[in-house]
Amino acid sequence: MAVTIVPFGRTRAGEEVLAGRIENAAGMAVTVLDYGATIQSVCVPDGRGGRVDVALGYDTVAGYEAGDGYLGATIGRVGNRIGGARFSLNGEEYDLAKNDGENHLHGGLRGFDKYVWDMKAVPGGLACSRISPDGEEGYPGTLEVTVTFTLSEDDALAITYEARTDRDTPVNLTNHTYFNLNGGGSVLDHTLRLAAHRFCENGAGCLPTGRMLAVEGTPFDFRRPKPIGRDIGADDPQLRVGGGYDHSFDLDGGPAAVLYSAQSGLEMTVETDLPGMQVYTANFLSPRPGKGGAVMGPREAVCLETQLHPNAMNCWGFPSPVLRAGKTLVTRTCYRFARR
Ligand code: GLA
């Protein structure tokens, strides 16, 4: 395993941004930026002598700073939405920034995706750390976070999230990579299998209501592999809310997802110890130039964001995201690649 760290650019404020590259003997290579602890590229050998970069992203720091799509980024302190940008904890009310209509999204006005982290090489990969101070974006407690990206010789990219707080606080860390197993173009002909017989019902603004709906007999049934585009245009109230799939699936256990493209022959399996996964078909990805100048746009990728269910602070019955003072949170998600 070769791990190298080289300069990538500078932020508007003049901070240096580094790119870490992990490459295995088989030729799979992953680039991680210390800006946002962001996965900038995932280049997977296609078995025919080429490599496909299966992650959408930008060539410049400016792209990441300007972009609103969280491409490849680590999301925190709390991924996805908190209704009304409010929660109560230990009898106290906390007000957060409303950066998505009336709701709080992906950590607020300046989430973890918009900071330069400390990055260093570790065995098999790269570790990114940052300290989120007490009161950052309205959250209580100083949170120490380390996100470690490792690559195995059999083409599995693992992300381990570790966090520790000095006061009780909600934490829900995820990664927001936009996957396209052909390297670009529509993602609608990729097939997807999801190990989930329920998903979170969304209300207005894609905010979970707290109810779970059965996938049975709905466009949300991916228990057998199905092209993402097969039912995405169905006249279904849940699909209308977010203009496509943008829902947290309640995972049954075992591999959470298998994504496959017949065009490239690449398959990606997602494994996680988390109970939920946001399946997001890039509905809000407005057209913009990405790597190599190629224009990216809606439905060009799918995000498979492993997480605790959104709005869990306000939905009784969802697994709690509260990390207690002095406790350490450790979760792991793995993206495993194969050729079929
Ligand atoms: C998540 C959300 C989407 C959208 C994207 C970022 O996946 O669920 O609604 O906000 O992030 O654009």
Image (cartoon, rainbow, N blue to C red):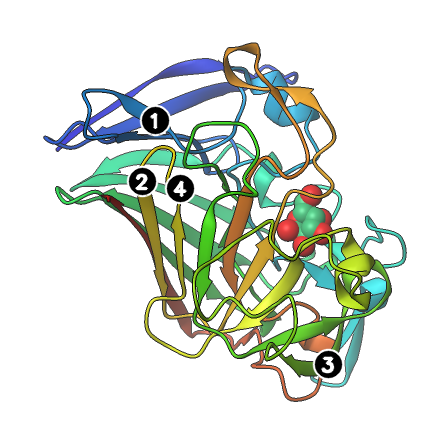
Circle 4: residue type: Ser
Circle 3: residue type: Gly
The numbered dot on residue 103 is none
Residue drawn at 57 percent across, 34 percent down: 186
Residue drawn at 75 percent across, 43 percent down: 109
* Residue, disc 1: 52
Expressed as whole percent of the image width and height from the top left, the position of residue 247 reads 65, 63
**Between 220 and 227, the one nearer to me in the picture:** 227
Of the 4 image quadrants, the one containing the C terminus is top left
Expressed as whole percent of the image width and height from the top left, the position of residue 40 reads 44, 29
Q: How far separated are the C-alphas under marks 4 and 2?
A: 6 Å
Residue drawn at 70 percent across, 87 percent down: 316
Residue drawn at 76 percent across, 66 percent down: 238
Q: How far separated are the C-alphas under marks 3 and 4?
A: 33 Å
What is the secondary structure assignment of the residue under circle 3? strand
* Residue, disc 3: 210
What is the secondary structure assignment of the residue under circle 1? strand
- Name the mark nearer the viewer: 2 or 3: 2
- The mark that comes first in sequence, 2 or 1, is 1
- Name the mark nearer the viewer: 2 or 1: 2
